[in-house]
Image (tube, rainbow, N blue to C red):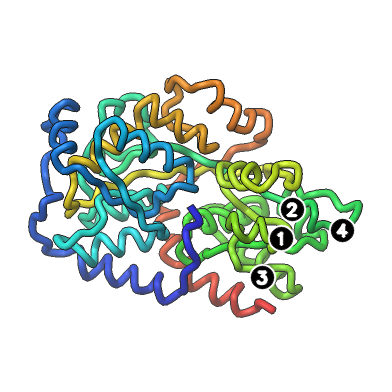
């Protein structure tokens, strides 16, 4: 998912929409009781709907392409997606309400509780509920992770001066002459975690982003920070020297362009996150959306995600050899950091747009 670039105004608009539009909503078609249905009944109702519309789940991200093709082949359910950031997805749900054009979205873990709090999500646990770790789901199925990723660096070796090795840490970047690319920190989940990862390496955490902000500020002041996103197209065009991506995106992009050209390195402390499907409370096709979540958590769906370089949330999922080969080996990772205080991180993300503008964007050259 390229999770498009956005402006700070959009982040502020999201807050307004989530506050203003989530109160007092009536019962749309999506406000249904999915928990009372057997998988067989859910499948029958989903087939009657015959279509599902997603946001933020495009073909290029985590191999969603194969999952949507399998759902169409298996159930006859047609699919269409509109790519957007996690914040945009929830803003869309809140703004459209009963006129919903989206049934399901894929958002970063921090946005799952926000969707639940704002009354935007529809509960559905799936038959694989017990296989999902407690930290990766809420109590009643408003959100549950389908896959995880860890932050890494992707370096275009063609863009490095002769004899310069790819960086292995944020300190390497700070002490060297590397030009670092980061995407939309104001609203993009991946880029916010890249900021968090930098903060952690220099002594911060989810409550204290100051060390990370100082790191990016210094790069901005030295003209070594680019904010044009480490997308597949930008990497292919040679516009990124060093980028920060989830491992599944870095591996995917490198393989698409040519693996020999890129080196993927994992920092000493690597932040882990996950992504959760959110079924729109007001969905026009709630049963098809729930069936999509059911399929995504199945062995077949988890295998598809692994073939898209993402690490499935179900440790007991039966994966093909092809899928296993797509993942980085366990010894590629050093210390793995999972957000310990989710509430604190949720509060921090509300201030990131302003902090980024004041402490980094203002110093870009």
Q: Secondary structure at mark 3?
A: helix
Determine whether 65 is above or below 9 in the image.
above
Instruction: Depth check: give the residue in front, 251 or 127.
Output: 251
119 with respect to 300 (left or right) = left
Q: Marks 3 and 1, how far apart in space?
A: 24 Å
Picture quarter containing residue 22? bottom left
Quickly name the residue at label 2.
156
Quickly name the residue at label 1.
238
Q: Which mark is residue 131?
A: none
Residue 264 appears at what percent x and percent y?
70, 43
Picture quarter containing residue 241? bottom right
Q: Marks 2 and 3, how far apart in space?
A: 23 Å
Q: Residue at x 17, y 52 (%)?
A: 284
Q: Quadrant of the C terminus?
A: bottom right
Quickly name the residue at label 3.
217
Of pointers 2 and 3, the one earlier in the residue sequence: 2
Q: Residue at x 42, y 22 (%)?
A: 317
361 with respect to 92 (left or right) = right
Q: Residues within 10 Å of mark 2 (few under 14, many from 20)?
A: many
Q: Residue at x 27, y 69 (%)?
A: 17
Camera-near label (3 vs 4) is: 4
Q: Residue at x 75, y 54 (%)?
A: 171
Picture quarter containing residue 314? top left
Q: Residues within 10 Å of mark 3 (few under 14, many from 20)?
A: many
Quickly name the residue at label 4.
161
Residue 130 appears at what percent x and percent y?
31, 25
Of pointers 1 and 2, the one earlier in the residue sequence: 2
Answer yes or no: do the residues labelled 1 and 2 have beta carbons within 8 Å? yes
């Amino acid at each position: 998912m390229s999770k498009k670039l956005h402006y700070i105004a959009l982040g502020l608009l999201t807050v307004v929409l989530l506050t203003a539009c989530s109160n007092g909503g009536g019962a749309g078609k999506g406000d249904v009781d999915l928990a009372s249905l057997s998988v067989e009944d859910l499948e029958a109702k989903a087939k009657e709907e015959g279509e599902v519309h997603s946001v933020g789940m495009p073909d290029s991200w985590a191999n969603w392409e194969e999952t949507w093709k399998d759902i169409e082949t298996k159930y006859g359910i047609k699919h269409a997606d509109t790519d957007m950031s996690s914040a945009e997805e929830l803003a869309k749900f809140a703004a459209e309400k009963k006129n919903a054009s989206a049934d399901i979205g894929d958002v970063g873990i921090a946005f799952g509780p926000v969707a639940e709090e704002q009354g935007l999500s529809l509960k559905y646990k799936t038959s694989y509920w017990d296989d999902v770790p407690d930290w990766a789901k809420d109590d009643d199925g408003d959100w549950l992770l389908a896959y995880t990723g860890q932050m890494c660096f992707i370096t275009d070796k063609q863009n490095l001066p002769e004899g310069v090795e790819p960086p292995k840490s944020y300190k390497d970047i700070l002490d060297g002459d590397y030009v670092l690319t980061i995407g939309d920190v104001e609203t993009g989940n991946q880029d916010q975690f890249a900021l968090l990862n930098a903060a952690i390496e220099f002594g911060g955490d989810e409550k204290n982003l100051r060390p990370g902000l100082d790191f990016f500020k210094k790069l901005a002041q030295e003209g070594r920070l680019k904010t044009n996103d480490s997308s597949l197209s930008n990497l292919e065009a040679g516009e990124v020297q060093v980028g920060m991506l989830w491992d599944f995106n870095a591996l995917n992009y490198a393989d698409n362009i040519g693996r020999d050209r890129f080196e993927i390195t994992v920092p000493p402390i690597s932040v882990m996150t996950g992504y959760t499907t959110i079924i729109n409370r007001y969905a026009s096709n709630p049963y098809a959306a729930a069936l999509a979540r059911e399929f995504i958590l199945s062995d077949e769906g988890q295998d598809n995600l692994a073939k898209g370089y993402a690490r499935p949330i179900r440790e007991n999922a039966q994966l093909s050899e092809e899928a296993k080969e797509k993942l980085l080996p366990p010894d590629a990772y050093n210390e793995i950091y999972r957000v310990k205080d989710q509430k604190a991180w949720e509060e921090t993300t509300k201030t990131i747009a302003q902090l980024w503008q004041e402490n980094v964007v203002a110093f870009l050259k």
